[in-house]
Amino acid sequence: MSEVKTNAMLTQTMLDAQQGVLGAMLIDPDTVGPVLSRVRASDFTLKQYRTIFQTIQALFQSGKPVDGITVRENAGAQFGDLLVKLIDATPTAANVDEYVSLLKRSSTLYYLQELGTQLSEAGSLDDAQELLDKSMQLRVGKPEVQSMTFAEGYEQFFDRHDGAKKPEYLSWGVPVLDERVFAEPGDMVIIAGRTSDGKTALALQFVAGIGLKHRVGFFSYESTKDKLFDRHVASAAMLSYTTIKRNQLTEDHYQELLELKDKLTAPQVRLIDAAGMTVLDIQAYSQAHHFDVIVVDYLQKVAVPSWLRREKEYDRVTHISSSLQQFGRVSGTTVIALSQLSRGERDKKSGKVRDPVISDLRSSGQIEQDADVIMLLYREDYDDKQSNRILQLAKNKEGESMDKVRFRFDGDLQTFSRIAPGAEEPSRKASPPPRSMQMKITEITDVAGAAEIDRIFPPEKEASPCK
């Protein structure tokens, strides 16, 4: 890219921002460290400015003082007049944060425009994909470093724990989980299970409740958005999924669904067909839609950048897990990722498949390291697809672990119902409760005897029964 072309494309805003950042560092050495933590040499589009920045960076890293004289001595006498101009053009170093923000925005826009030009001239799909990956990296940007001293932490501790405001964690709609799992912004939660154990149905049931207070993005690599919403309707309206799939809805069904419109649409959940999306794609889309929580269904199917496609599955999944975890940490987004478990091994004596453990997480041990919470979902009897489900809290950084919760899973209603400890075994053929009862249920509660179908659902002050 020629210097002439560069100068032609630069706007006055970009020039002002670059001058302001460099001038502030030359005026006030205390600004150098904070600026270097946020700015890169590539943010400077003029070669002379980039050289000055790199000279300041080298001086700082070697522990030498940074000012107009030391920079001129190390960059070269030819930069003398430009350094004087930068100092004179900067009114104050107090506005350095604003200069940096302006620089980051303008340089990102500039390079995106450059990539757009290159994309229009790409000679192959691989070349185009590589340029798209670069654009995603630019869009995400370099995060600002967050830090505090022990003294600052001491002051903030009392503000955070003064008792005036109750901390808000994600609600799972299951009291025993809500009392133990304290998922906060930036945490990574893994829900792992074997094929057909109901991971997606459970995640949909969770987010129907989570979405009442948080914006949720559900990135699906297995089902289309239409199929996911059909499953949501089956669970929330207690309507046979088979009836929905066969398109056999009656007039009564339509009337009931019309009456349930507010409840079906209340959760702030966006369903995304994610096939082919990389973590960078997820990150850019999530930031554009301001999601508080994202669900990835499922982790092993997330696409990887072109340079990783020929690597072993272990390396690909390691990259995906680490990238999702870092995205959550940097952006404050809670990540709920579904994961496959390896096939269960059978005990030689009993012939039964053993219960899963954390090491059964498929493809990468990195998942175990990255997760703050790991829930293992499996059947009590592996060989019986209608068997009750067990949800085991296998890892919980901020609370108790090893708790096992029993559920009845109704595949036709896409609904999990908790079986209370000591309760009688629910009958699989038991009829669901009347619709007037169903509309009042707001969470997954205990089954205290016969089978009871519950779901996370928005409460209403005055719930009128369906006809």
Image (tube, grey):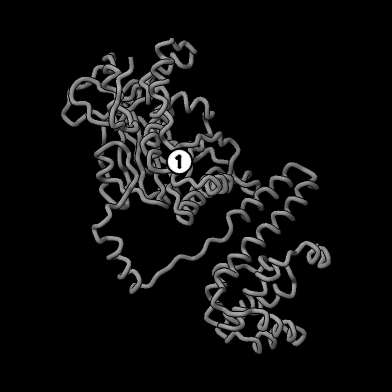
Residue drawn at x 64%, y 88% as measured from the top left? 70
Q: Position of residue 354 (x, y in %)?
A: 32, 33
Q: Image check: 176 left or right of 28? A: left
- Which quadrant does the C terminus fall into? top left
**Residue 237 sits in quarter:** top left
Q: Residues within 10 Å of mark 1 (few under 14, many from 20)?
A: many
The residue type indicated by label 1 comes to Val
Residue drawn at x 28%, y 14% as measured from the top left? 431
Q: Image check: 165 left or right of 92? A: left
- Asked if 309 appears above or below 265 in the picture, the reply is below
**Residue 22 sits in quarter:** bottom right
In this view of the protein, which residue sits in the foreground, 233 or 431?
Answer: 233
- Which quadrant does the N terminus fall into? bottom right
Is residue 384 in view?
no
Q: Secondary structure at mark 1?
A: strand
Instruction: Check disc 1 and report the residue beneath it.
Output: 216
In this view of the protein, which residue sits in the foreground, 290 or 293?
Answer: 290
Residue drawn at x 52%, y 26% as measured from the top left? 226
Q: Position of residue 339 (x, y in %)?
A: 44, 38
Q: Position of residue 230 (x, y in %)?
A: 46, 23
Is residue 425 in view?
yes
Residue drawn at x 73%, y 82% as measured from the top left? 82
